[in-house]
Amino acid sequence: MSTAETIMFRAPRLAFRTVMLAVDLSPLPERPFQLALKIARLYAATLLVAHIVPAEQVVDYPGDVDRLKVKLGKRLLQGVGGELPDVQQEVLIQHGDVCPLLIGHAAQHHADLIVLGTRDPVGLEKLIEGSVAGEVAHRVTVPVLTVGPKVFKAPEFGRVLYLTDFSDASAHAIPYAVSFAEDCGAALDLLHVNDPDTGETPHEAARKLREFVRDEIRNRGFGEVFGRMNLQFGPRTERIVEFASDRKIDIIVMGQRHTSPTRARIGAHLAGGMAQSLIALAPCAVMTVSDSTSRCLASSQI
């Protein structure tokens, strides 16, 4: 491929103009807030803070909502030690069904990225409580950056890990991983885990990785951005978590299929989903990119 042809396929730049942070007040999540604030500063974006009071709670309008806005505003300022002079902010409070309202706010305010924290349980508790994070990630058409319960360090953007299972959804996430890494000046690695439960043999995994790197990475002009192309073997979630811990990964980027509201809600109440299992155990935030996402990529600046 010629140099001119390679340049044509370089990733367009990310255009995060509005970063939406979904929070609750028990307690205000520190790590998701810090992460959303850092990204808003990086992209000079508006920080939209949304708190949905669950439908089962009784709310007195407008008094309770006004008090919640004041309370949330104070906690935000306490989180950064005073003021946010360099970031434009907006606080939204609403009462009702959490997931549909978050998705509606994201669409209404043209959010380009949704940041949220999760304390999602696993196993039987998950069947009962479900996962707002999982349902949102499957239904929206913008990237979702989820901070799981194992994330303890302050947000950094030194190392980004892109995960692939060779699907169309994972290929769709490549430009987002590339652009985010370039915008942050971060190292970018690729990882595929050959899990025996998938029926993929090690030989097939090695062949598919070579073909994927050739067709989706190098032929699209992304070869110089990526560092190591890693293939590991074993239980998928376990190996990814180990890799992220050993390499001190700061952000994991992966593709995810967009699904209907009904499928998303059912899936959110079932344990075992790849993204949700990873979010629950990973030592860093996980960015899921729907295969229908396109709005937050601006025109190429090259």
Image (cartoon, helix red, strand yellow):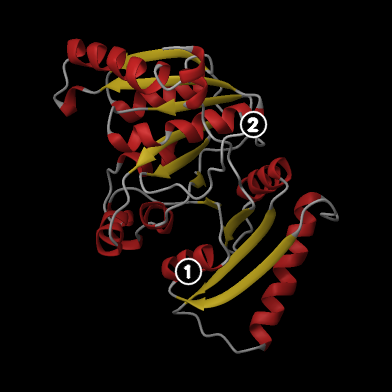
Tell which circle, 1 or 2, labels the residue nearer the N-terminal end. Answer: 1
300 vs 258, left or right, is right
Front residue of this view, candidates 96 and 87:
87
In the rendered image, which residue does mark 1 sit on? 104
Kind of residue at badge 2:
Asp
- As drawn, which residue projects farthest toward the left? 199
Taking the spot 49% from the left edge, 80% from the top edge, the residue there is: 57
Tell me if I can see residue 97 in this picture: yes
Residue in the image at 53% along x and 68% along y = 108
| Location of residue 163 by image quarter | top left
Q: Nearer the viewer, residue 293 or 281?
A: 293
Asked whether, in this view, residue 119 is left or right of residue 206, the answer is: right
**Secondary structure category for the residue under label 2:** helix
Q: Decide: marks 1, 2 in contact (CB < 8 A)?
A: no
Q: Position of residue 273 (x, y in %)?
A: 29, 43
Is residue 283 visible in the rendered structure shown here? no
Q: Is residue 20 left or right of residue 191?
A: right
Q: Which residue is labeled 2 in the image?
A: 183
Q: Please state, as top left, top right, bottom left or bottom right, where the C terminus lies in the image.
A: top right
Residue 185 lies, in percent from the top left, at 66, 24
User: In the image, is residue 210 above or below residue 107?
Assistant: above
Question: What residue lies at 47% left-to-right and 32% top-to-bottom?
Answer: 175
Q: Residues within 10 Å of mark 2 (few under 14, many from 20)?
A: some
Q: Mark 1 or 2, which is nearer the eye?
A: 2
* Mark pair 1, 2: CA separation: 28 Å
When the figure is inspected, residue 191 is found, relative to residue 121, above or below; the finding is: above
Identify the element where label 1 is drawn. Answer: helix
Residue located at (61% from left, 89% from top): 61
Where is residue 38, by image quadrant? top right
**Residue type, label 1:** Gly
Q: 10 Å neighbourhood of mark 1: few (<14), some, or many (≥20)?
A: few
Residue 41 x/y as whole percent: 73, 44
